[in-house]
Image (tube, rainbow, N blue to C red):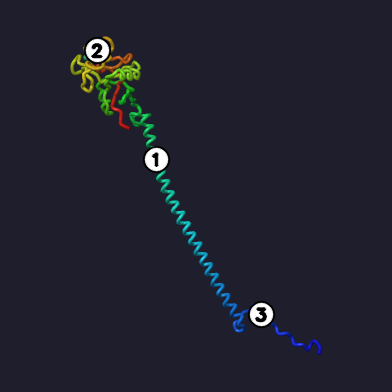
Amino acid sequence: MGPSCKAAPKPLPDLSICDPSQSLFCSKDRNFLRQKLRSSLTVYVLLALSYLLILILFAVSLSRGTVIGAFRRLCLTSLMRQEVGATQRDVGSVLFPCGPEAREWEYFSGKCYYFSLRETSWQRAKVLCEEVHSRLAIINSHAQQNFIMYRTRNQRFWIGLSDKNSEGEWKWIDGSNSTTGFTYWKEGEPNNSGQNEDCAHVWTYGEWNDVDCTYKCYYICEKPAPRL
Ligand SMILES: [Ca+2]
Ligand SMILES: [Ca+2]
């Protein structure tokens, strides 16, 4: 017989084509694929949830860190401000012992002194000192006298001393008697020249002189130094 008499081989089924009516193998394969797909989907969902959980935890820790950091910065800033404030007060009390708002006042031995820049009568000077809660200066020690002498530089400055109430009875503005305490009269003073010299001022070398109370002099106010 010739080659044409041989039966043609029966073709094998194409397993890549899945026809439910064709073979058991195809059905098993499809179920397998479904199970695999489900398990893969589960893995993906779990991975997504894990990532989400990680993101949430990261965000929470970041926010906690931010809040704690902000709180710490706030505390540190507050402490720094307190320290800076205390330092500024310390520096201020050294630079301005009479108070930073009273820089024109000069400190000496627990008191603050103001040396006026304009001249006026003794009575007006008294009022001007009282308006700034002070009084005309009372001198009762050599140290205080030296301080005032150095500062007044031979200029005439009223001090809180007069014999207006009783001629010859020199009293300080606080009512204390001058004659029993420290004095620094210029030689020959007080002389009540013209019978009309009832107010005292410092003058050359800081020495005291009596003069007419309406005379125009600079003046010295004094007040206790503030507690800083
Ligand atoms: Ca007099
Ligand atoms: Ca005099």
In the image, 145 versus 7, the foreground residue is: 7
Q: Is residue 24 left or right of residue 139?
A: right
Q: Quadrant of residue 18?
A: bottom right
- Kindly identify which residue carries mark 3: 14
Residue 27, position in %: x, y? 59, 80
Please give the name of the residue rendered at 28% of the width and 10% of the height, measured from the top-left corner.
187
Please give the name of the residue rendered at 53% of the width and 67% of the height, measured from the top-left corner.
44
**Residue 190, labelled with which disc?**
2
Q: What residue type is labelled 3?
A: Asp
How many marks can you see?
Answer: 3
Q: Outermost residue toward the bottom?
A: 1
Mark 3 vs mark 1: which is more N-terminal?
Answer: 3
Residue 153 vertical position relative to residue 28 in the rendered view, above or below: above
- Kindly identify which residue carries mark 1: 81
- SS at mark 1 in the image: helix
Q: How far apart in space, not on screen, are marks 3 and 1 (Cα)?
A: 85 Å
Is the distance from the Cβ of mark 2 to the nearest ligand 2 atom less than 8 Å?
yes
Mark 2 vs mark 1: which is more N-terminal?
Answer: 1
